[in-house]
Image: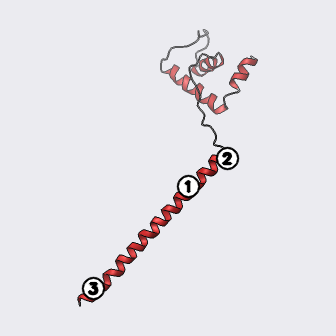
Amino acid sequence: MEEYESELAKFTKFEKARIIGARALQLSMGAPLLLKRPEEMYDTVKIAEAELINHVLPITIRRPKPLKLEEREDAEIKEAMKAAIKAEEQEEEEETADIKTKEVPEAEAGED
């Protein structure tokens, strides 16, 4: 029992719920049992729990690795640089738009 608890301690309660729920759904849809079912056990959730306890489920959990502090700071700097470049590009577009609108009235004045 101690070995079971140490193995399941690696999973969060959310991961356990997801594994058991997914396996219970598979069983309800007709997937083959990975353990011999006791005669009185018909509940797919309980069967899925028993399979998890006995380590017969071929399910793995992938967790994203946390970013190191330096990587986070680098990412923040890159984001800030991208935002600054984008702001400069928008300012340049606005300036060129202003120049074009200023040139049009001068051209019209010369035609009269």
Q: Which disc, if any, is residue 69?
A: 2
Q: CA distance from mark 1 to mark 2?
A: 15 Å
**Number of marks present in the image shown:** 3
Give the residue number, with chain letter if any, for mark 3: 108
Are there few (<14), some (14-19), or many (20+) residues within 10 Å of tag 3?
few
- Nearest the viewer among 108 and 10 is 108
The amino acid on which the numbered mark 2 sits, given as a three-letter code, is Leu
Where's residue 77, x and y in %?
59, 55
The quarter of the displayed image where residue 80 is located:
bottom right
Spot occupied by residue 96 in the image (x, y as percentages of width and height): 39, 73
Q: Please tell me which of labels 2 and 3 falls first in the chain.
A: 2
Q: Residue at x 59, y 11 (%)?
A: 35
Earlier in the chain: of badge 1 and badge 3, it is: 1
Q: Which mark is residue 79?
A: 1
Relative image position of residue 7 (x, y in whole percent): 69, 22
Color encoding of the figure: secondary structure
Q: Are marks 1 and 2 in contact (CB under 8 Å)?
A: no
Vertical placement of residue 62 versus 108, above or below = above
Query: For the residue marked with disc 1, what is the amino acid?
Result: Glu
Q: Locate residue 98: give its quadrant.
A: bottom left
Mark found first going from the N terminus, 1 or 2:
2
Residue at the (44%, 69%) spot, across then down: 92
